[in-house]
Amino acid sequence: MKITVKVNGLACERDVEPRTLLAYFLREECGLTGTHIGCDTSSCGCCVVVMDGDRAVKSCTMFAVQADRHEILTVEGLASGGTLHPLQQGFWDQHGLQCGYCTPGMLMASYALLKHNPKPSETDIREGLAGNLCRCTGYQNIVKAVQQAAQTPVGAGR
Amino acid sequence: MIPAAFEFLRAHSPDEAFAHLQKHGADARVLAGGHSLIPAMRFRLARPAVLVDINGIVDLGYVRMDAQALAVGAIARDSAIERAAWIGDRRWSLLRDVSRVVADPIVRQTGTVVGSLCHNDPAGDWTATALAARGHVVIRGKSGPRTVGIDDFLIDSYTTAVSEGEMALEARFPVPDDRTAGSYQKVERKVGDFATAAAAVQLSLKDDGTIRSAGVALSAAGACAVRVDEAERLLTGQKPTAELIRAASAAAEQRSAPQADLRGSVEYKKHLAGVLVGRGLRQALARLGVQL
């Protein structure tokens, strides 16, 4: 089935089997391996990407054909021109990761969260990231990282 | 874990979806949010030959209220309930509660109310909610749409009144009268896990403070969500007291028929069902200004 997905601003046209999951499409067809696959069943959030600008989706539980003619933002699309996105900078500064496996999903879920709620409380952040699991950090520094990013003025890379 | 191959058909109108479903019968499944169906396909627990994607039918994305009922279209997301303008109204407190604990916040942006009812998972949240709120489902069949009460809709695990070639168009929840409140109580090991046990409760009071009507239902307590008739019977017409709540809780514990699994033993889950009904009744009453 022929589909065209705009991934990080670039049109990606491929002929895929309908059963191809979006996560595998991004990794294997688009070569964007920043989107990780953890649990494969929408529990862990490692595979979260942003669809159409502000909607976080678990790409392991969506078929690539469902993204036809939609826009997808992956972790590779966050930084611009070598400058880290404020969320990435926040995770760097606040040590919001250890092994890094959950980080792309955390970043993309946080990105969508800030789109809907530019000034989230700590509770908003914890509730908003409840669908993303991290087995290293205990979440404390992830929350701090998102709080740091939320202090960056909207427009300054957000 | 990759699903078995299938044919993917996009529907742009309810008529088109219905025509696809009529043509392919038992081989076809409707794809709405997909957050139950796609994992089932990945585990090869479901192997539909045809998927009819209804996500492009924008006309079915509504959540609207009239004087009689709240109507939720087939592709309205769980998050649309959570964010509805009226969700803070205490009459809808059962729906407010449940809309915040279904799966996780990201899944709620894709998962649908109607899809969850149609999936009829033994531990579903919307099924128990619809029982307590006395909801209905509108099904498009060969002879046109028909409205089925939730008790007749939920047949068995993963089985509903939606027959081969049919599709569910809408879930309906009657608008409760003013002195109504509810509560959804769920114990889960972590956000997004299936409930260890859950209870949905909705109560309406008369002016004299007695209970006009009661909805009490359990999830993760049997083959599919179950109405606790005995608790409803005990509550209706009575003045709420601590003893009455204890009796309703005991009826729920009695009615619960869970299976033992990693989440707990049968004994534990039955006990929990009773406790959660008690908590739900107390919270619903507190929301109506009755402290016990």
Image: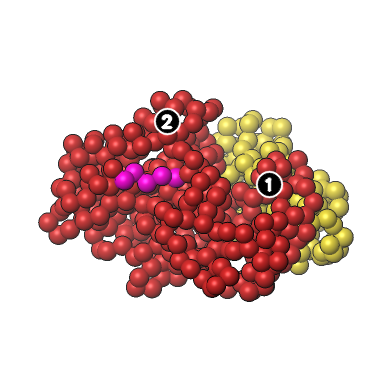
**In the figure, is residue B229 to the left or right of A150?**
left
**A131 or B160, which is in the foreground?**
B160
| Residue depth check, mark 2 versus mark 1: number of the one nearer the observer | 1
Q: Secondary structure under badge 2?
A: helix
Question: How is the rendered protein coloured?
Answer: by chain
Residue B159 appears in the rendering = yes
Q: Colour of chain A?
A: yellow
Number of other residues with Cα within 10 Å of mark 1, as a class: few under 14, some 14 to 19, many 20 or more: some
Image quarter (top left, top right, bottom left or bottom right) of the C terminus of chain A: bottom right
Q: How crowded is the residue under tag 2: few (<14 C-alpha within 10 Å), some, or many (20+)? A: many
Give the image location of residue A85, x and y in percent. 70, 52
Which residue occupies 33% across, 33% down? B254
Q: Is residue B240 magenta?
A: no
Q: Which chain is red?
A: B
Q: For residue A6, what is the image quadrant?
A: bottom right
Res. B219 image quadrant: top left
Q: In the image, which disc is placed on residue B209?
A: none
Q: CA distance from mark 2 to mark 1?
A: 28 Å
State the SS at label 1: loop
Q: Amino acid at mark 1?
A: Ala
- Relative placement, left or right, of B223 versus B216 is right
Q: Which residue is mark 2?
A: B269
Relative side of B97 to B202, left or right: right
The residue under label 1 is: B46
Q: Are the residues flagged by discs 2 and 1 in contact, CB closer than 8 Å?
A: no
Residue A135, placed above or below residue B112:
above
Q: Residue at x 51, y 57 (%)?
A: B161
Magenta segment range? B225-229
- Please indicate whether residue A4 sits to the left or right of residue B17 in the image: right
> If the image is split into quadrants, where does the N terminus of chain A sit?
bottom right
Q: Residue furthest front?
A: B143
